[in-house]
Image: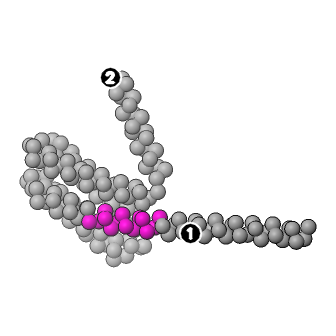
Amino acid sequence: MFPVMNNLRQLQAYRDNQLTTTDPGTVLLMLYQGAIDAIKQAKIDMASGNMASKGKEILRATDIINQFIASLDYEVGGDLAHNLEALYRYMLEQLLAANAYNDHQALDTVLSLLVTLKSGWDEAVVAQRKKAAQGNYNEAKKEVETELDMRRTRRANG
């Protein structure tokens, strides 16, 4: 029994480290995937009559969506942040209905919205990474050119 507990602790430490050392875009995508996975599992649990697990999975998705709301920056995001908040709150209402009334359609609605949003964020994160990589390339290129110029100057003067 103790080796299992040790393995669980190691897995949790790995996950904690992964979250603290990963870029924000990847963390966001991981959270979206976590909410999607939770809703998929809640659908399975609902269909099989496992109401305790269904409730746990819906709570997990709810916690993630609440974190999305808490992390919105209204000054930077403006109307987009307000629109996302309204959409997230709608999802929370749907999850409440799904849990209270075993509403499959409500879970499907939230799942569809999360998949669509994640797809958009996937594209945005990839674009941001490309932009950052290009910026890093240009910065490195400038540093090399500066170093070469300094060497040429030293040779010409030396």
Q: Is residue 154 left or right of residue 78?
A: right
Q: Residue 118 placed where, x, y %?
A: 31, 62
Residue located at (64% from left, 65% from top): 140
Specify the quadrant of the image occupied by residue 12: top left
Residue located at (70% from left, 66% from top): 144
Q: Residue 27 placed where, x, y %?
A: 40, 55
**Residue 59 visible within the image:** no
Q: Residue 48 placed where, x, y %?
A: 9, 43
Please give the count of numbered marks on the rendered protein: 2
Above or below residue 22? Residue 14 is above
Q: Residue furthest right?
A: 158
Q: Amino acid at mark 1?
A: Gly
Q: Which mark is residue 1?
A: 2
Please tell me whether residue 88 belongs to the stretch shown in magenta.
no
Q: Residues within 10 Å of mark 2 (few under 14, many from 20)?
A: few
Residue located at (47% from left, 49% from top): 20
Magenta stretch: give its range. 116-129
Q: Main secondary structure of the magenta part?
A: helix
Q: Which mark is residue 135?
A: 1
| Mark 1 secondary-structure assignment | helix
The CA distance from mark 1 to mark 2 is 50 Å
**Residue 142 visible within the image:** yes
